[in-house]
Amino acid sequence: MKKRSNKKAIMGVDIGGTKIAFALVSSGKLMTPVYKAKTPHGSKILNVVEEYYEQFSKKYLIAGIGISTAGMVSDDGAIVGSTGNIPGWQGTKVKAILQKKYHLPVVVENDANAAAYAEYQIGHAKGANPLLMITLGTGVGGGIVVNGRLVRGAHYAGGEIGHIKLSHDKQRHCTCSRYDCFEAYASGNGILALIKHYFPHKYKKMTTRDLFKLAKSKTKDGILAKRAIEDWHFYIAVGICNLFHVFDPEKIVLSGGLSSEIDIKYLTNETRKLSLPALSKAIHIESSVLGNDAGFIGAALLASQSL
Ligand SMILES: [Zn+2]
């Protein structure tokens, strides 16, 4: 007989800088379509969450709420830092407010951590120990699962891999206001810096999408675009190599909007060239199969554990 808790619906919520995604989730599977709302000012986010809760609860018995959010999250589910892209959200005691209102288990987790947990539980890298997930998008984030548990850190900054240093020559400015972070090289902004370098006369009109498209042509500019993309892969390989030698992950999963542009075989080879020879064959990189849903699915899985 199946455990009753496996059948209960969890409201999964993913709070990003531009959108909030909602769906009901049971045992990691979607029970409803994914609904999306524009992210309001931080002070209004919980109003939107409450509106969706009311809608869902008309049709379903909701047993818990799992929230994945940009920013650092404390053990008691409050937003404690790094939410520059959601003004007014820092300081919100999300878990305490929702628990008081609905008397349900509520889990609040950093979005990259939540996504890493989903990959560990139901992704292609299921059960990998350790598992390292890297999100490549406008920024660079990460999540680390060791022995089935997220590495959240002593200051809730575990997995903030975007700000490890790739260099020391102040060539690249990072969104954290420092220089030479992994994010400044591997993110969408890092690609824009490469466009500026390779196409100094055209860069203002080129997007990252233009670069990937151009790299498919056999023209002179196409060759330059390909070179820029190889540089981007090299920087990501440097970051992965550094992290690999710290955690020795069984599997590395890439997610985020830019991960679909990664040539996994090329990246794996570049990373292997940089790593200790004895370890190079152990480097295993793959793409996420959960995509944009990983954040709220992971948060829902975490919430279902507290039922
Ligand atoms: Zn930084």
Image (tube, helix red, strand yellow):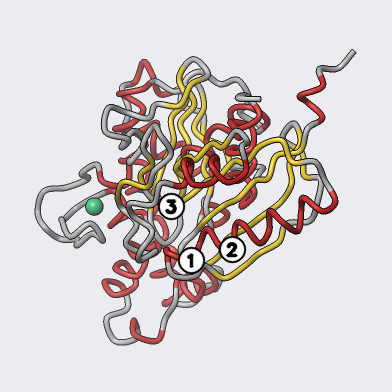
Quarter of the image with the C terminus is top right
Instruction: Identify the residue at horizontal 49%, vertical 76% (top origin).
Output: 210
Q: Residue furthest left?
A: 169
The x and y percentages for residue 103 are 61, 37
Q: Nearer the viewer, mark 3 or mark 2?
A: 2
Residue 67: quarter of image: top right
Closest to the observer, 57 or 114: 57
Mark on residue 70?
3
Which of disc 2 and disc 3 is earlier in sequence? Answer: 2
Instruction: Identify the residue at horizontal 48%, vertical 77% (top origin).
Output: 219
Mark on residue 44?
1
Tag 2, which secondary structure?
A: helix
Instruction: Identify the residue at horizontal 56%, vertical 21% (top origin).
Output: 128
What amino acid type should be assigned to the residue bearing mark 1?
Answer: Lys
Q: Is residue 168 left or right of residue 95?
A: left
Residue 215 seen in the current view? no
The x and y percentages for residue 139 are 38, 57
- Mark 1 and mark 2 residues within 8 Å of each other at the beta carbon: yes
Instruction: Characterize the local packing of mark 1: few (<14), some (14-19) or many (20 or more) Cα atoms within 10 angstroms.
Output: few
Instruction: Characterize the local packing of mark 3: few (<14), some (14-19) or many (20 or more) Cα atoms within 10 angstroms.
Output: many
Q: Which residue is mark 2?
A: 48
Closest to the observer, 153 or 241: 153
